Amino acid sequence: MILIEKQIADIFKRTVDALYGEQELRAIDITMATNEKFGDFQTNFAMVNAKVLKSNPRAIAENVVNNLVENNLIEKVEIAGPGFINIFLKEEFLGEVVKTISKEKYDFSFLDTEGDVIIDYSSPNIAKRMHIGHLRSTIIGDSIKRIYNYLGYNTVSDNHIGDWGTQFGKLIIGYRKWLNEDAYKENAIEELERVYVEFAKAADEDPSLEDLAREELKKLQDGDEENNRLWKEFIQVSLDEYNKLYGRMDVKFDTYYGESHYHDMMPGVVEELKDKGIAVEDQGAQVVFFDEETKLHPCIVQKKDGAFLYSTSDIATIKFRKENYNINKLVYVTDERQQDHFRQFFKITDMLGWDVKKDHVWFGIMRFAEGIFSTRKGNVIRLEQLLDEGKKRALAVVEEKNPGLSAEEKENIAEVVGVGAIKYADLSQNRQSAVIFEWDKILSFEGNTAPYLQYSYARIQSILRKGEENGKVVREDTAVNLGEKAEKALALFLTQLPNVAMKASETYKPNLLTDYLFELAKKFNTFYNSCPILNQEDEVLYSRLLLAERTAKVLKEGLDLLGIKTVDRM
């Protein structure tokens, strides 16, 4: 299905081509009107092309309006102000557009979808439980993936886990010295965290343990069989734990290429940097210096002891992706503190001549009012705790509002609503803003929240069920009548999901979708309160029933782009 704005733009383009021939003009931009008195859509074509056409904008607008090519979309056009053109659609046309929603796929062929969009997000460190500090990267990255898939891109989601480095020498010693096997069988990752802390305490008393840890790490790096076995075990038990949480959040990854995946590539990367004169020796280390205008600090790619750094690993990651994928773009979702790091290694890959589009999608840190989360301060909330609390609060509401449901259905609704509330509370923020964590705020079920949208969806399902009980089911062949103001406003707004998704993809801001869905739910409730459905004559009933059903489809599709599920009853 061709987007409604594209269809209108085509009418204006044919008109303009006939009037002004082959002149180089700015593209015709069609936008939805912000006020119904200005029509359904608007264009400022006359104003932005006045200089090129060497004419008064209002005169250009009059010329376009008076010569508009014949079409079956537009009821009338009006000129406003200095040259805006207001466009009013035919109700019959808009009604037919509504009928195609969810039945036909939108045509996004004008987008450059060639190649793979590789999205790097979540990225927890092995042998540490995920906490709420991991929430933002995980769900923002997942939403970006869903939005790009919706627009027709091929996405590759990669969980760049922290599975290499000095912590593994410490873990191996801690495992051998202080492991409680029963606790390990009960919750392996929690026990690994505990022995890691034990190592830190013991190393404060006996610094020689740090040397032993480095020896164990060296043995691992050299391929020692037992250390390699333990390392793989630590990764597996960690991923098993993470995947339980990812499963609850409906988050999936295509690859789990951690830092270890690129370890063997890093010496070659450093050699290439040296050969091209990009990295030079400085006090025994290999360092990349940048031009002064970049305002970037020097970047160490290999320490004087031969060890590599995150920058080396990330450069190797791009090299690997360049050689193994047809890259459309690379997208990295991390918190704001890593901005300089990304600017550095992005610049280095540009200096290497690697023509790869790269975007660092950074977000504000989630913190308590009194400061950031800290394991040492003991103020970290585990992600599992947050999800459990969300479910618990949702279950209490379900028990109160709908006690007649089965225990199984209550549990399912509570899980969907609780997790949805948590995701939406985060995604509805501007991602670049810092988020102050408050239990009541992140688990709110009222106002601009996922439960409000989920309830709107469930309410429509209830209407559809009641209609079915009375022998009134949605008829695809019905005419959609939009005589009432609330009907027209709802129908028009239903057409906007693809445009909002495109804007969200361009800016990497899922909150544009939450804003749209909240407004859509409000428009539906206005429609429902002013336009009764099931007690009307058939012509009106079937029209409004279809309009309600299409609203439910758009709500569900939009929530899915945020990774939020719906339920038929609440």
Image: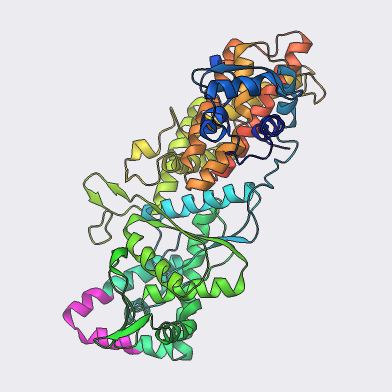
- Name the residue nearer the viewer: 290 or 127: 290
User: Residue 62 appears at what percent x and percent y?
Assistant: 61, 19
- Image height of 223 relative to 7, above or below: below
* The C terminus - image quarter: top right
User: Residue 269 appears at what percent x and percent y?
Assistant: 45, 82
Q: In this view, does 345 lie to the left or right of 102?
A: left
- Image height of 489 relative to 345, above or below: above
Q: Which residue is drawn at 35% across and 66% down?
A: 341
User: Residue 567 appears at what percent x and percent y?
Assistant: 60, 35
Picture quadrant of residue 103:
top right
Q: How many marks?
A: 0
Residue 208 on the magenta span: yes
Would you say residue 181 is visible in this rendering? yes
Task: Name the colouring of the figure.
Answer: rainbow
Q: Is residue 101 left or right of residue 391?
A: right
* The N terminus - image quarter: top right
- Name the residue nearer the viewer: 443 or 327: 327
Residue that extends furthest to the left in the rendered view of this protein: 205
Picture quadrant of residue 67:
top right
Would you say residue 523 is visible in this rendering? no
Q: Which residue is drawn at 40% across and 34% down?
A: 444
Residues shaded magenta: 199-215
Q: Which residue is drawn at 57% across and 32% down?
A: 53
Residue 69 on the magenta span: no
- Name the residue nearer the viewer: 168 or 3: 3
- Image height of 514 relative to 223, above or below: above
User: Residue 385 appears at what percent x and percent y?
Assistant: 40, 50
Picture quadrant of residue 55:
top right
Residue that extends furthest to the right in the rendered view of this protein: 477
**Overall secondary structure of the magenta stretch?**
helix
